[in-house]
Image (spheres, rainbow, N blue to C red):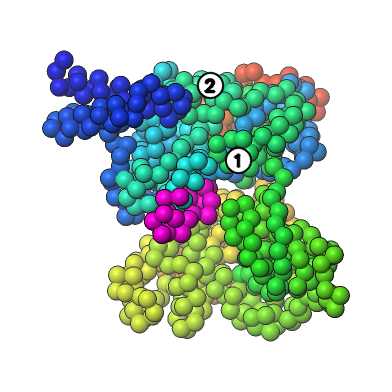
């Protein structure tokens, strides 16, 4: 056996031992024997660098240092899941599914919801080429070097894997591994980590990958995305992933009804504490991939999946004081300042009280002993009061009448849940809040500028609105506290670089009430540039898909304010993007304007998602269900018979994908 053959043989042997130990939990050799073989391989690789292999088991030890994690776009968006908390929620979800799919049999795959840090792994020709954090779902941080150190992540696959795909999962710390890490920290005189989830998430952003390699991280996988994968169901996804070498828990179950789903959730609600890692619920997915494609997505979540959350954990503590926060829109949020209490692995000092109605409903008062819950929400909330422990001299909470920041009298519009400070041009938190929204990652994503710096710039009188950012100079910034020359340069350069951000994100950054990312994209696509949008009437706005009266009123109101017009005009003069790019314009027409399409079945020459995009790019609207307002049903192979029947009953024309493509050529 020559040197190259010896190196190849050692790599294959170590990969197999890694798989048996970290994925199957069935080691076949001792740790000492494994270490000896690894050292032999490392020695040969150092002596013969010409045989370098990016997937070698020797790279598991880390050593790469990453100072700045590159932000990269997900090829396939990572959606969040809608939550449910009861059998009724699941049954309502099933009814919504049946309304879209028609009278067809639907099976569900149930999997445990792992409480870790989401990750997307990209494989090409069986090799790990990229690992990206979830980020905002559209883009995340490239943490490939750190992920390569996790032993349960295969660097080289085996079996009949597709040529290219993304696989998603959670990076977790087992409870045993977490306890061991904390024992070592305490022994070394360091503070213990608070919980496994946050520690796993923080591990992914360590700059030195050799430190990541020392942590007992695992990767549990649960979904695959890509084109032409040849996989028919979610349950098959799990089986295939296991056969390729991924660690996929075997507790998943195929269920025929929501009644069977509830049996699964009821079992794990009790037995989750027997698991080696933390889980906070069950993810229920429509099993058929074809049906998943039929159901599609809302703006934020897949219609074919639902997270059933286990009952929230509670703690009892004292409410010391109620304070009030002012948001960027002027909304007032009451906050309960609590006696610190440990809840679900973190120390809780504050909890949301939502609004005046919630305070009155709970009759919560300062000094009360309260029940705090951390369920599906990130921010803990007060869910009740222990009235047996209330002081007899306690007085009901009187909600504030004036803004705690600027003293302006608060207003509460009919139908609104919250009180508002109407002083949008003079209330400091509203001013800085709008600027912080403007610079945020999903908006202008200005590097070198954070919330604290915005507060400092405003305090020093250097900025009064987000347009002022574009006139800042290094000389103005340098005298500020904790601002070195390099930091000042980065801030100015980051502001300048943001001028290339596309129109739809600039529109979102303006902070128009009710105009989120999805709405901003729809408005940008519909009106093409800011001038057309600024002069649009409410009637013109509500014609746009998913734009209702509330959003339309908000947009018209925003652009009726002279101060907002002035800021936009300044931003235009500084070179920000206030129209769609030429490439975007070239890909759009009004050919299908006013027409609504339902897309169903499997297509030959174009993917379902590309077909939907073509409809929207040409001015049409895509709907998930057939109604009397549907213009055409684009039917592919294996379309459900109920959809065809409904279309025929309502007189909706049924066309093939070729018919549709010909419409665009006409």
The residue where tag 1 is placed is 279
Q: Is residue 293 left or right of residue 386?
A: left
Residue 380 counted in the magenta span:
no
642 to 513, vertically: above or below:
above
Front one among 349 and 530? 349
Q: Residue at x 59, y 35 (%)?
A: 275
- Judge whether residue 570 can be spotted in this image: no
Q: Residue at x 55, y 39 (%)?
A: 277
Question: Dot 2: what SS?
Answer: helix
Q: Quadrant of residue 155?
A: top left
Q: Residue at x 53, y 48 (%)?
A: 197
Going from N to C along the chain, the mark reached first, 2 or 1, is: 2
Q: Is residue 365 left or right of residue 226?
A: right
Front one among 384 and 191? 191
Residue 189 counted in the magenta span:
yes
Bin the neighbour count of mark 1 within 10 Å (Cα to Cα): few under 14, some 14-19, many 20 and up: some
Q: Is residue 521 left or right of residue 632?
A: left
Q: Which residues are magenta?
A: 183-201
Q: Quadrant of residue 622?
A: top right
Which of labels 2 and 1 is toward the front? 1
Mark 2 and 1 residues: CB-CB less than 8 Å, in contact? Answer: no
The residue where tag 2 is placed is 239
Front one among 574 and 399? 399
Numbered label attached to residue 592: none
Q: Residue at x 39, y 38 (%)?
A: 150
């Amino acid at each position: 056996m020559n040197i190259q053959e010896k190196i190849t043989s050692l790599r294959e042997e170590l990969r197999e031992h890694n798989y048996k130990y970290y994925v199957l939990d069935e080691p076949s050799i001792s740790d000492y024997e494994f270490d000896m073989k690894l050292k032999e391989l490392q020695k040969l690789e150092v002596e013969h660098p010409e045989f370098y292999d990016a997937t070698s088991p020797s790279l598991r030890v880390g050593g790469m240092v990453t100072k700045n994690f590159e932000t990269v776009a997900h090829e396939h968006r990572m959606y969040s899941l809608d939550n449910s908390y009861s059998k009724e929620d699941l049954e309502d979800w099933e009814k919504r599914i049946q309304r879209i799919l028609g009278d067809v049999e639907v099976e569900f795959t149930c999997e445990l919801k792992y409480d870790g840090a989401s990750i997307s792994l990209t494989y090409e020709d069986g090799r790990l080429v990229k690992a990206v954090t979830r980020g905002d779902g559209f883009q995340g941080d490239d943490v490939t070097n750190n992920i390569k150190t996790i032993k349960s992540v295969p660097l080289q696959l085996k079996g009949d894997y597709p040529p290219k795909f993304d696989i998603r999962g959670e990076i977790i710390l087992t409870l045993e591994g977490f306890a061991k890490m904390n024992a070592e920290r305490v022994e070394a005189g360091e503070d213990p980590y608070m919980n496994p989830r946050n520690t796993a998430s923080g591990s992914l952003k360590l700059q030195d990958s050799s430190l990541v390699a020392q942590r007992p991280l695992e990767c549990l996988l649960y979904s695959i995305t890509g084109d032409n994968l040849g996989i028919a169901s979610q349950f098959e996804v799990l089986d295939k992933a296991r056969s390729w070498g991924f660690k996929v828990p075997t507790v998943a179950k195929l269920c025929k009804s929501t009644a069977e789903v509830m049996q699964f959730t009821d079992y794990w609600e009790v037995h989750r504490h027997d698991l080696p890692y933390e889980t906070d619920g069950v993810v229920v997915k429509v099993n058929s991939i074809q049906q998943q494609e039929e159901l599609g997505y809302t703006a934020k979540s897949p219609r074919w999946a639902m997270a059933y959350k286990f009952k929230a954990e509670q703690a009892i503590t004292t409410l010391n004081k109620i304070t009030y926060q002012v948001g960027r829109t002027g909304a007032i949020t009451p906050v309960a300042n609590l006696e610190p209490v440990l809840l679900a692995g973190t120390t809780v000092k504050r909890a949301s009280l939502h609004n005046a109605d919630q305070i009155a409903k709970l009759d919560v008062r300062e000094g009360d002993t309260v029940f705090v819950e951390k369920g599906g929400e990130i921010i803990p909330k007060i869910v009740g009061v222990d009235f047996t422990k209330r002081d007899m001299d306690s007085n009901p909470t009187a909600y504030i009448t004036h803004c705690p920041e600027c003293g302006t009298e608060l207003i509460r519009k009919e139908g609104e849940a919250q009180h508002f400070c109407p002083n949008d041009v003079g209330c400091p938190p509203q001013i800085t809040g709008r600027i912080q929204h403007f610079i945020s990652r999903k908006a202008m994503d200005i590097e070198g500028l954070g919330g604290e710096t915005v507060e400092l710039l405003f305090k020093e009188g250097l900025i009064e609105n987000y347009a002022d950012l574009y006139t800042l100079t290094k000389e103005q910034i340098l005298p500020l506290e904790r601002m070195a020359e390099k930091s000042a340069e980065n801030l100015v350069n980051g502001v300048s670089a943001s001028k290339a951000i596309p129109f739809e994100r600039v529109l979102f950054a303006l902070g128009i009430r009710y105009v989120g990312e999805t709405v901003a994209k729809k408005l940008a696509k519909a009106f093409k540039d800011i001038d057309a949008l600024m002069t649009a009437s409410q009637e013109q706005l509500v014609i746009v898909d998913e734009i209702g009266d509330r959003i339309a009123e908000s947009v018209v109101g925003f652009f009726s304010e002279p101060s907002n017009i002035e800021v936009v005009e300044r931003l235009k003069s500084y070179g920000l993007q206030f129209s769609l790019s030429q490439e975007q314009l070239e890909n759009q027409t009004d050919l299908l304007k006013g027409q609504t399409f339902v897309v169903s079945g499997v297509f030959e020459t174009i993917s379902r998602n590309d077909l939907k995009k073509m409809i929207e790019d040409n001015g049409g609207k895509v709907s998930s269900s057939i109604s009397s307002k549907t213009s055409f049903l684009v039917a592919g192979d294996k379309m459900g018979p109920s959809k065809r029947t409904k279309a025929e009953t309502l007189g909706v024309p049924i066309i093939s994908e070729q018919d549709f493509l010909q419409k665009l050529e006409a």
